[in-house]
Image (spheres, grey):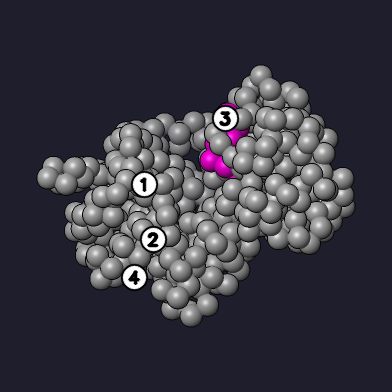
Amino acid sequence: MSAALKVPQQVGDFEEQLRDLKGRFAAMMPELESIVRDPALGVEGYIVVWNTGISVGGPMERSGKGGTRITQNVTLDEVKMLARTMALKNAAAGLPLGGSKSGLRADPSAPDFEKKYRRFVKLCAPFLRENGGPFGGFGFDIGGRPEHALWACDELKSTTCFTGKPVSMGGTDYDREGIAGLGVAVAGRTMMEIQGVKPSESMFAVQGMGAMGAAVFRYFSETGAQLRALADPKYGGTWMMRSSPGAELKHALICQDKDAVIKLLPQEADKLSDDCESVLYLDADILFPCAVQNVLTETNSVKVKARFVCEGANGPCTEEARTKLHERGIHLVPDFIANSGGVIAAFVELTSKSAAKAEEAKAMTRQKVEANVRELYDLVARHRCEPQQAGLYMALSKILASA
C-alpha cells in the first residue's frame, strides 16, 4: 500500500481520506466494455472488466472476475454497475483480483436458449484470460443454471472458462456447497464474538431461504445457535419456530426441498404472516436478510429488534438504513464483506492445483471472512465510523493503490 493510503490516525483524517477515495473511484471508467452480437441468432451480450491493476503480481495477472447475468432485459449499463460492484467485493475480500461481469439478453427457458448461449460464449472467447484478455471467465448469477457450465466448457474446450462447476470437472460447486452462505455465517459469528456475545447462546432469523439463506441456516446452526424464525414466499410467508428444527426439517431446509418443508414446517412452527417482511422485526439476536435488495430502509429500520444484522443478499439495506441501524447501536456487516465466499471459491477454482478445491475454498472463506470482519470492526472502533464506511475504505484503498 502506498504511503498516501496508510490508515489515518485521526477521525478527521479518516473521513477526509475516505472522501478522496470515493471521488477517485467515482471517476474510474471500466478498462473494457464490449457488446457481442450475432443478429442471425438474435444474440446480444455484454462483457465489462472494471479493473485489473489489483491483480498484477498475483496468480491471475491482469484480470477481473464476476458472474454472468441472464435476463431478457439486461443492459450494458446494468452489467457495468455489477462489474463495479464486483471490483469492490473482490478487493474487500482481500483477493488480488479485479471486478468484471458478463450478461446475456435472453430467456433461459426458451427452446433455442442453448444455441444462443453457446454462441454467446464463443463470441466472448477472445476476451478470456486464457486467450490473453482481461476477462476472468463466466460464472453463476441470476438466470444461471448448472448446465450452463457444461455448455460453456464444451463449446470452448476449456474447464477454466467457468467457475462454480461440479467437483467432477475440477470445480468447487460453490452453490451446492453453500460457500457464499458459509462466509455470511462466519461473518455473523465473528461480529458477535467481537462484541462478546456467544453465537451458541443466540437465536437467529433468516429472510430468504434460497441458496444463500439455506446455506446460512446450515452453517450458522453449526455454531449452536437456534433458528427463531424464517421467511420465504415459497414456504408461504413468515414462520416462528417453537424449538430448534428437527432432523427431517433441517435436512429439507438445507436441501431446499419445498414439498418436504411445506409438510413439516407447520408441525414445528407457527405461521406469523403471509408476507416475508415480518421476520425483519422479530426479537432475535441476529438477523440475516438473504432475499432481495432494499428490504431495510431508513423508514422501517427503526423497527428492527435484532442486535446484529449480517447482510447475505446483495444490498438488502439501503445506505440510509445502515446509518440508522448504526445510530441505534445495532452492529452490521455489509454485503460486500459478508457474502464474498462465492468469489473466494471462484478464485480457488481458477488458481488452485488441489484435487480438493471445495474444501480449500471453504477453508479460505473461513479465514478471509473472519480476518476481514475483524479488520472492519477495528476500523469502526478506531475511527468511530459506520461499518459501511470502514468496508468501503478497506476495498477502495486496495483498488486505488494499484490504479
Distance from label 1 to label 4 (Cα)? 24 Å
Do we see residue 260 in this rendering? yes
**For the residue carrying disc 3, how many other residues have a C-alpha within 10 Å: few (<14), some (14-19), or many (20+)?**
some
Q: Are marks 4 and 2 in contact (CB under 8 Å)?
A: no
Distance from label 1 to label 2 (Cα)? 12 Å
Q: Secondary structure under badge 4? A: loop
Earlier along the polypeptide chain: callout 3 or callout 4? Answer: 4
Q: Quadrant of residue 123?
A: bottom left
Q: Are marks 1 and 2 in contact (CB under 8 Å)?
A: no
Q: Quadrant of residue 294?
A: top right
Q: Which residue is mark 1?
A: 109
Residue in front for this viewpoint, 118 or 287: 118
Residue at x-position 53% and y-position 31%: 16
Question: Which mark is in front, 4 or 2?
Answer: 2
Q: Which residue is mark 2?
A: 147
Residue at x-position 41% and y-position 31%: 23
Tell me where the magenta segment starts and ends, as one range.
312-318
Image coords of residue 321 (percent x, y): 64, 27
Residue at x-position 40% and y-position 67%: 350
Distance from label 3 to label 4 (Cα)? 36 Å
Q: Is residue 316 magenta?
A: yes
**For the residue carrying disc 1, how many other residues have a C-alpha within 10 Å: few (<14), some (14-19), or many (20+)?**
few
Give the number of callouts.
4
Q: Is residue 88 magenta?
A: no
Distance from label 1 to label 3 (Cα)? 28 Å
- The numbered disc on residue 294 is 3
